[in-house]
Image (spheres, rainbow, N blue to C red):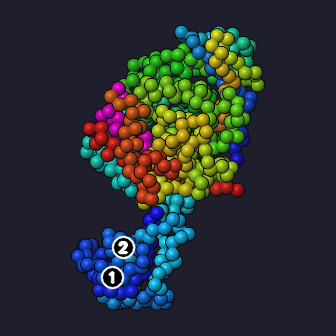
Amino acid sequence: MKFSVLVVLPAQEPLRDLATASLRGRRSVRNLKSVAMPRGFELDKSFGAVAIGSAESGFTTIAALKPAESKDFVVRGTIEAESPEEIPVGTTDRPIFADPQIAPFPYCSGAAQGTVVDVRTKLDVSGLAAKGLDGDKIAIAIMDSGINLAHLTTKLGAPPRLDVSNSWTPANSTTLPGQYPVDHGTMCAYDALIAAPKATLIDYPVLRANAPGGNVTGGTISVALQAFAHLLANYAVAYAPGGLPKYNGIVVNNSWGIYHPTWDFPAGHPGRYCDNPNHPFAAIVTALVNAGVDVLFAAGNCGSNCPDGRCQGKTTGTIMGANAYANVMTLAACLATNDDRLGYSSQGPSIVNMPQQKPDLTAYSHFVGSEAGGVGRPDSGTSTACPVAAGCVAAIRTKLPHATCPPVNLIQQFQMSARTARGSANGWNADFGHGIIEPVATASSLGL
Amino acid sequence: MTESNDRSMALYQVEGFGKQPTIEEIATKLDLPPVDIDRTFGVVLLDPRRGMYCVQVRGEKPASYDKESGAYQGPWSSPNIESLDDIDPPQ
């Protein structure tokens, strides 16, 4: 087995030339056969050489780092060994050093990283607009804590499109669509419009309904089920003129979930939700998807590096319930500034008995955007990644009818067009899914 | 920390109805008293192709199975759900 190693070699003219060529971005044509190498070491010429001044510890001047002056050079190559333990520590007084893989540290700080401008740039929103992909005549249902239209108008400089008549009001609620307190739902609405500024929002305050427990920004699956049924009925069953069929597509954003299985019936109960693909909620999601509606869910915030306290320390199998359904797009979160995974972003595989390869994709979060949580506070969590992706879906749907590309097929197109995050393997992985969402590449792959 | 699932209400589903059933018809199929079915929640359509509907039922009831197909009808869990943004660090 070959192991990548680093070796420090004393100055030799071929190495000086190799290092100079590396700095100038060109290839060295010098013959390296005369360079004294440790026995068994195979040089990687593509790496070049790096002048390090003197390998002895102590202060090294800048001048000593020049290839012409440097006493020592680092080169990379491989050594053959059965196992890492059998790699020699050195040969002929030249130590051999490890060359371990490096990967970005997941981000766990509370501070925002980047702004909505970074997100627009990374998503290439102008590229989408150039293709005419802006969400026009597409509705995005924000299943959340309600939207505050006035806040969005202030942030966007103009009122976004909001369909009040097709929005949903929970039983016993007197708040009108678009007039909810500035909160999580407003954040999600803002983020959904990043890639699809001309989409129409529909307000579904499922987290604002008076659920048992009284949590203002909490709900229950039964409330979500009612809301989904309202959407299904208005879109695909019995609709009035001016109803949801006037839109060319419907996208549903769900930045919610359950944090721990103890919130559910006990393990093994036939009526359990979190690991049961036969739950009634699965039936209604499937009915909606079969009607051509794109459904997205946030993966969750129980990532191993810095999980939310509500995860109760559980960081495996945390993508549960609807967030793990096969026919929804499940989103993990990363920074827009450098693609580093957000440490709280839930990792796959899903809870046992649900489709395992979740999340599907990764989108951007933790940036200054809506400021729904306060000035300078980030739009955060996989809650934010989900509507960022929902906007991408809405943008694509501007010119892609669901009859041409059903929702499950569109998820696959996004997966195939995703960008592999640095430090992660190609294909699906537990941190990023199939990779970071690339709406322009997806659009191009679909001929848009 | 959020309280775990409130067990005072549970979901039940029925299948095979050609048109929207009444609460009384669903109560008969579930072998439950109609008064235990939450009329505020109502009869919710799950899947028009399968004639599948859902109701919410008060109180803890025994498991219910469709007499013809044997399919499990409830109780189904309705756990609390919460938004996935503000990160509460572990205590």
* Image position of A109 (left or right of B2): left
Q: Position of residue A138 (x, y in %)?
A: 37, 33
A318 in the magenta segment? no
Which of the pair B18/B72 is nearer the observer?
B72
Q: For the residue carrying disc 2, how many other residues have a C-alpha within 10 Å: few (<14), some (14-19), or many (20+)? A: many
Q: Secondary structure at mark 1?
A: loop
Q: Is residue A432 visible?
A: yes
A189 in relation to B67, above or below? below
Residue A115 visible within the image: no
**Position of residue A366 in the picture relative to residue A37 (left or right):** right
Which residue is nearer to you in this view: A273 or A90?
A90
Q: Look at label 1 and name its amino acid.
A: Val
Lower position in the chain sequence, tag 1 or tag 2: 1
Mark 1 in CB contact with mark 2 (< 8 angstroms): yes
Callout 2 amino acid: Leu
> At 73% from the left edge and 21% from the top edge, which residue is drawn?
B63
- Alpha carbon distance from label 1 to label 2: 10 Å
Q: Which residues are magenta?
A: A389-403
Q: Label 2, on which residue?
A: A43
